[in-house]
Amino acid sequence: MRLRIRFAKIGRVRWTSHRDVARMWERALRRARLPVAYTEGFSPRPKLSFGLALPTGCESRAEYLDVALREPVAPGEVTSTFSSLLPEGVDVVAAQVLPEGAGSLQEEVTSCRWEIDVPQVDPDSLSEIIARLLGAEVLSVTRERKGRPVTDDLRPSVLALSSAGPCGGGTGLIAELGTRPRGVRPAELAQVMGIELGLARRTNQWIERDGSRWEPLATPAADAAVWERAS
Amino acid sequence: MTSLWPRIEPLLAHVTKPARYIGGEQGACEPDHGPGRVAWLLLYPDTYEIGLPNQGLQILYEILNERADAVAERSYAPWTDMEAAMRAAEVPLFSVETSRPAAEFDILAFNLSAELTYTNVLNLVDLAGVPVRAADRGADQPLVIAGGHCAFNPEPMADFVDAFVLGDGEEAVGDITAVVGRWQSQGAGRREDLLATLARVDGVYVPSCYEPSYRDGRLTGIVPNVAGVPEKVEKRTITDLGEWPYPKQQLVPLIEVVHDRLNVEVFRGCTRGCRFCQAGMITRPVRERPAEQVDRMVRDGLDRTGYDEVTLTSLSSADFSGIEKTVSSIINDPECSGQVSVSLPSLRVDAFTVGLAAEIQKVRRTGLTFAPEGGTWRMRQVINKLIREEDLYTAVDAAFSQGWQRVKLYFLIGLPTETDEDVLGITALAKTCVEIGRRYHRNVTVTASVGGFVPKAHTPFQWFGQNTMEELRRKVILLKDAARSVRGLTLRWHDPEATSVEGLVSRGDRRMGAVIESVWRAGGTFQEWSEHFDLSLWTEALETAGLTFDDAVYRHRGEDEVLPWDHVSAGLHRDFLWQDWQEALAEHGLEDCRWTPCYDCGACTGLGVEHVVASSVAPAGGSQGTGQDLDSGGMVPVRFLPTAPPVLTGPVLAGAGAGVGEAGP
């Protein structure tokens, strides 16, 4: 049986890495004595699979984790007890048993929605930058990979950009970024936009297929209301 | 309360491993600072990943936070990128819990575990905005305190540290809190008065209350310059480890650190008597934790932290009375469902220990490490690490036959009386180990890890002139040549330059302070990190100070020479150490005094304490595991724990059990 868990990562804990979060979960699952399935061999590891890595420094309300279990458990137990076993800022939002044959997070997720603070840019300037970006044919970024520069075009993965109006001393940016042909990180988007990256928060991961889209695990309505109030 | 967090967070996006600076560990306190509470900032002068697991610091952290009159927070050395960002943004050193500026604490307390971190201590004091020299600090500035093993030669840091704590800190921190609290409540008058009061606390050494004298470039004595302070400062020793079941809430960090697992200290002190080992000499006598308490600390710790690995820590954990019972109760605990692994640091070299290791490493069987330390029997008699070749081969055979394919061997080079034959004995031993391994596996790896020996204060080798870096380099080349033709043998060695500098600081006198300060001022931080270590900084600083490696490091000391640490005591009689030094030169070994008569080293008699062990006989594997005809002295003062007698059963393998029952009191 596989259990899918949706969790948030908010506050100071955003400075931990994706791997750090995986280790937090391993410890929390052991503390909860959940019957987690382990890999075979001399070095058994719990069978956990996380979705798209969240860059260090970003917050999220939509992180996912699939846990393989040796025997069934009630998802409700997980939602009610887990947050207290995890570090402050990592909170379980929802949990659900996956149907047999459900695809993995890595395979299924097609895009992510981000809310990004853009400091020191007013709404009009940001709108201009957005228009320029969406009008571009190609958005090249160069990065180093195995000691060699590799140039990628980000344009196919920039699905939608819009301004969320003034926020703090700058402007809020809402971005929908695809995962194929390759995922785009907020820092790379900031680079091609020529802006400084403030706090970036992933709000949703989407699975889009045959003209409709859904989340790997929806936030329960009550929790969603809490999130709305909090933001 | 001032929190620097709003000024710290913007820096984090631009530095490596930003989570080093955010705290948030499970078990951390965010204490209420308030009037009537002495605020301690506990500092480890290396990165967060190295410093966080330090058990000494965590023990004091809990003890202080449990007190009504104290609070404690922590800080570590920011990595060079963060330091640059902090200095550029004028952000001072801060605590990880509440981001409070370091200078707002009453006490900055450093753990000194390694000499090459000393320049980091200066850097942290400076980052705190506090003058690095103790003499330049005013009444309203924090006290700088230091403890840990390196405090047993305090002199190189005497210019920078207001007070050192020698020995176990559990009780001393309470005494210091009381003195500082009283001084504050009386209106915080002159700093000299506070220091003079601290100098009267047992185990506390205040360098400004003592004056060194020199003649012809040599130290001739260090004596009190104020009335009422002891001529010789004796270390603090807790008599019953069972009264101190700390840490109760071991910190679980958010990021990966070294020793990232549960640690439970099973005993403190060691009397194996390895002559090179400062830890074994300065932490005597042996004080075991009651086995039931160990079991409880392991169980509660695993439950609380979610770790799947526990280390039973001590200087030689296989010597813990009833170690087998303790280990099997952990790994056979149904709650752990076979997923918890146990590790024992510094395995003893015998088959009994391998049998134990086989039992505990059912999961994650990686490599086994042994420390014969010397390449020949002669060498091992000199250093009193009495392992015969057949002991090592039996242990290695047991390891390979039980499934291990990688074995690591620790050695030292540059030991007293060492010849090239002794050095080459290292590769010869390792080569035989590879051959033994091939009987069981096609591919085996034996790694010989070779460190350069640095003589330390309060050991029998404190008089020995360290090998020069050229000599160590020559010996490394000898080993490399000998190892080249042996398939399956990997040789690793420690940088001889860093070894020389470690020697410079470990036995230096107060004049070494100027050298440490110059190196720090020239940017020499993180000197224990090979990418930052810079010999030229040290060479230049030495020259400026008018000191030399030849005199400070490579020179043999005579019996009558005043040593810079003669005015502080780890309980050991100087004549015992000298006698043991002579025994070493005579290639003469001594048995472990836990199960054989007393040599009167001074630790038990002088401190009025006793060994506390649960077993009246040496553990399987023997006192020194050799059955050699060794000398022994008078009667043993040993107190036995009032617990059930240990049962020495289980997988005792061939070659083990040599010492059982032959050395009762």
Image (cartoon, coloured by chain):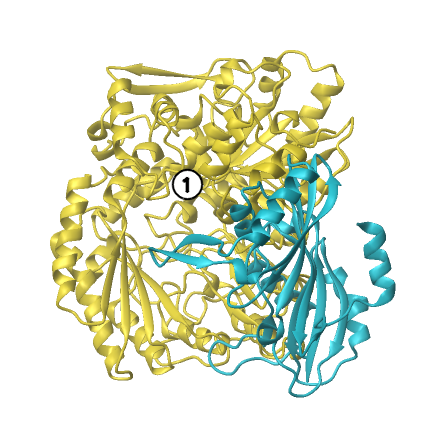
Chain colours: A cyan, B yellow
Helix, strand or loop at mark 1: loop
The residue located at (42%, 49%) in the rendering is B280
The residue located at (43%, 72%) in the rendering is B620
Is residue B123 in sight in this rendering? yes
Q: What kind of residue is marked 1?
A: Ala
Image check: A24 left or right of B80?
right
Image check: B377 left or right of B331?
left
Residue B267 vs B538, above or below: the answer is below
Kindly indicate the quadrant of the structure image that contains residue B381.
bottom left
Who is closer to the viewer here, B658 or B258?
B258
Residue A76 percent across, percent down from the top left: 82, 74
Image check: B68 left or right of B479?
right
Position of the N terminus of chain A by quadrant: bottom right
Residue B630 vs A31, above or below: the answer is above
**Chain of residue at mark 1:** B
Residue A215 percent across, percent down from the top left: 72, 70
Residue B664 vs A226, above or below: the answer is below
| Residue highlighted by disc 1 | B114
Residue A103 percent across, percent down from the top left: 62, 81
